Image: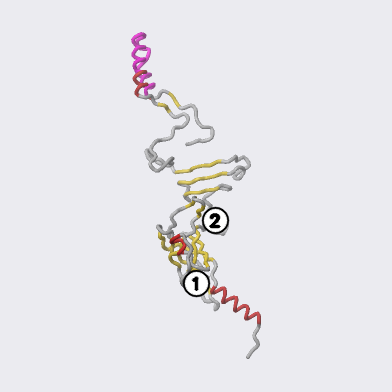
Amino acid sequence: MPDLDVNTIVNVAKREVSQELRVMGVAVITAVARATSRVAAGFVARFMDTTMQARDEQPVIDVPIAHYSAGGYGVFMDPALGDPIVLVAGDAASRPFFETGESFTPQIAQPHSFANSLAFLGGRVSSSVPGQATAPPNGPGEFTCGANDGSATLIARGRGLTSPLEQGTVIIATTTHLPPAFSLLLGGPAALLGVARNTDPVAPTSAMVAYLSAVAAAANIIAPGSVSPGVLAAVLLQVGAISGASLKVSVE
């Protein structure tokens, strides 16, 4: 019987442990259960065993999503098919907790495997080949939260972070809609009244129209032709323009 080399034994043991003890893997979503915040996913890297043979990883199903939420606040979005995720293998199943929100006792002993994983959304694909990188959705130094294409985005620029002159700015960027559809709704999805801006025209009320018409009629009796129909029509269309506005909030 040949002598056993300690290093060989250790290396074999390490390989066996690395094959059995799963930790983290990158996958793409193949199915979404929106109501329960669960996904199914397939791994992007094939599994290499101790004999240097590659095989497809076993897909995972019904994996809870670790949404970013705490203290009554949260960031929620619907994952889509093909989205990248990070799967973290657990020592025990997490699914029963996300079913009820209560602690539980596993029915059987469970290994540290991807069958007990938790999904973290995110990741951005961008080539490291010079000249082939995909530009990030945010500008340098900006915090961006919203649509990747910028069609509905909250942009924060902290003091001195985007440039030495930056004092701190929050931008709500949206695409321009054709009226009467609004691109920014304040108060709720049923908001229907437009926001007035500095220099916007001011239209007269019905009472003001009646008053100005009477004044013009009286003036024309005293001095015929002093108030022409064109002048009166222009006044009744717009009596002025907004000249005072916030010095802190601006709109397009």
Q: Position of residue 160 (x, y in %)?
A: 62, 43
Q: Are marks 2 and 1 in contact (CB under 8 Å)?
A: no
Where is residue 192, by image quadrant?
top left
The disc label shown at residue 133, or none = 2
Q: Position of residue 81 (x, y in %)?
A: 43, 60
Of the pair 14 and 110, the residue shown nearer to us: 110
Lateral position of residue 37 relative to residue 136, left or right? left
The disc label shown at residue 110, or none = 1
84 versus 14 height, above or below: above
Q: Specify the amino acid type for callout 2.
A: Ala
Magenta segment: 212-236
Secondary structure of the residue carrying numbered label 2? loop
Of the pair 92 and 236, the residue shown nearer to us: 92
182 versus 40 height, above or below: above
Asked if residue 4 is among those painted magenta in the image, a careful observer would answer: no
Closer to the camera: disc 2 or disc 1? 1
Where is residue 209, by image quadrant?
top left
Principal secondary structure, stretch drawn in magenta: helix
Q: Can the viewer see residue 176?
A: no
**Number of dots carrying numbers:** 2
The 10 Å Cα crowd at callout 2, few under 14, some 14 to 19, many 20 or more, is few
The quarter of the rendered structure image containing the N terminus is bottom right
Q: How is the image coloured?
A: secondary structure
Q: Residue at x 51, y 74 (%)?
A: 54
What is the spatial separation of the Cα atoms under label 2 and label 1, in whole angstroms? 42 Å
